[in-house]
């Protein structure tokens, strides 16, 4: 890529430079009628990009305290270039930014607009996406979480197909119900694998169309291996840190493809069989009417027993029979929870991910 300075961006067809960028984001903050946090973080991210000293970021905190670090400018540009090539993006392509800039996906969506000359439109993620868009809007590319896409499909499936060419999903599991709804969707939908440390996605999994797949495929010159635990190791020659050891258990197909199984720290060894909580949750997400997660607990017979934790204010004696009736037709016998906990509140990280501990 040619050297890029983060001093020019196109927003809704209007190219802004220098002080005009700062004024635009100041006006965006002032125009917010509710909480200003979303627009404030957008403005803050734009300022961080424009100061040319790198982009402050932090890990999600799912498996430990969040770690803060700075993503160097060359890494941001290299990541943006990978995205450009993976999705065939071109200067002037219209893209939608509908994620909070508190986390890496939102930060990188803004960085791509600067670096690639994309025409970006901002939509507050706290409101319904279709509600905030004109029916004539067309977007070549956007990134969002599965819940946002699920809601849009429920509201107006035809509009999604008309207004979005490609949607990149990340930041959460794709439920079995959503996966089924995507099969014949005309919009191209891809699931990304990545992290803050890898500067967002390093592998993609096609969720619909003729290339639909159950495995992730590396983009660019990225490649993979497994460590002694069976966890994914990511090699990123385009970044300043070229190796990343993860806690993701995988089935390695070859050095550019893998099937994700679950987190090493979450796997349950029950009766000699491995049970992956994330896979159970993908099947029960749309089945159970309560927020929930699966985990393991010591068991004298099985080694570990499957435990289901449910968030509800209702009495346990009411919730448990209801849940068991639903699970009996969905889970295999060795996956069935031996214990069910009904909690008034499940602890979550700042990004909304469940803290299983």
Image (cartoon, rainbow, N blue to C red):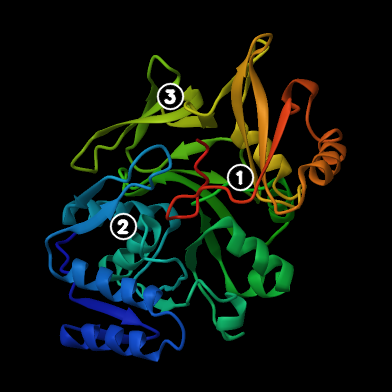
Q: Residue at x 26, y 72 (%)?
A: 44
To which residue does mark 2 refer? 80
Task: Please provide percent x and percent y for residue 323.
Answer: 81, 41
Say whether residue 167 is left or right of residue 247: right
Q: Quadrant of the N terminus?
A: bottom left
Image vertical order of residue 202 relative to residue 245, above or below: below
Q: Are marks 3 and 2 in contact (CB under 8 Å)?
A: no
* Front-most of residues 234 and 129: 129
Looking at the image, is mark 1 or mark 3 earlier in the sequence? 1
Secondary structure type for disc 2: helix
- Mark 2 closeness class: few <14, some 14–19, many ≥20 residues within 10 Å: many
Judged left or right of residue 200, residue 169 is right
Residue 260's spot in the image, x, y percent? 53, 32
Task: Using the image, tell me which numbered label, if any, was put on residue 211.
Answer: 1
In the picture of the structure, the residue carrying the numbered disc 3 is 231
For the residues labelled 2 and 1, say whether their Cβ atoms are less than 8 Å apart: no
């Amino acid at each position: 890529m040619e050297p890029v300075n983060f001093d020019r961006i196109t927003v809704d067809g209007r190219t802004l430079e220098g002080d005009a960028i700062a004024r635009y984001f100041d006006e965006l903050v002032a125009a917010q009628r509710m909480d200003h946090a979303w627009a404030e973080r957008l403005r803050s991210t734009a300022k961080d990009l424009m100061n040319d000293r790198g982009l402050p970021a932090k890990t999600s905190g799912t498996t430990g305290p969040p770690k803060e670090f700075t993503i160097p400018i060359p890494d941001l540009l290299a990541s943006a270039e990978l995205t450009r090539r993976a999705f065939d993006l071109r200067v002037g392509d219209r893209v939608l930014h509908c994620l909070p800039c508190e986390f890496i996906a939102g930060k990188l969506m803004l960085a791509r607009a600067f670096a690639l000359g994309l025409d970006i439109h901002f939509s507050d993620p706290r409101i319904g996406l279709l509600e905030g868009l004109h029916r004539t809007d067309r977007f070549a590319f956007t990134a969002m979480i599965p819940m946002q896409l699920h809601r849009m499909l429920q509201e107006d499936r035809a509009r999604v197909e008309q207004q979005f060419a490609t949607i990149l999903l990340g930041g959460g599991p794709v439920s079995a119900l959503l996966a089924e709804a995507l099969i014949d969707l005309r919009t191209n939908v891809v699931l990304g694998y990545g992290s803050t440390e890898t500067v967002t996605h390093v592998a993609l999994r096609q969720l619909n169309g003729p290339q639909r797949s159950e495995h992730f495929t590396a983009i660019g010159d990225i490649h993979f291996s497994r460590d002694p635990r069976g966890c994914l190791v990511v090699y990123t020659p385009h970044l300043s840190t070229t190796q990343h050891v993860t806690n993701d258990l995988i089935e390695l197909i070859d050095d550019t493809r893998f099937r994700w199984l679950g987190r090493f720290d979450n796997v349950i060894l029950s009766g000699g069989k491995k049970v992956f909580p994330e896979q159970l949750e993908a099947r029960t997400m749309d089945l159970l009417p309560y927020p929930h997660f699966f985990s393991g607990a010591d068991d004298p017979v099985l080694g570990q027993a499957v435990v289901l934790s449910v968030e509800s204010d209702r009495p346990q004696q009411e919730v448990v029979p209801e849940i068991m009736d639903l699970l009996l037709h969905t889970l295999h016998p060795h996956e069935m929870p031996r214990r069910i906990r009904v909690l008034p509140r499940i602890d979550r990280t700042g990004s909304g991910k469940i803290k299983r501990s």
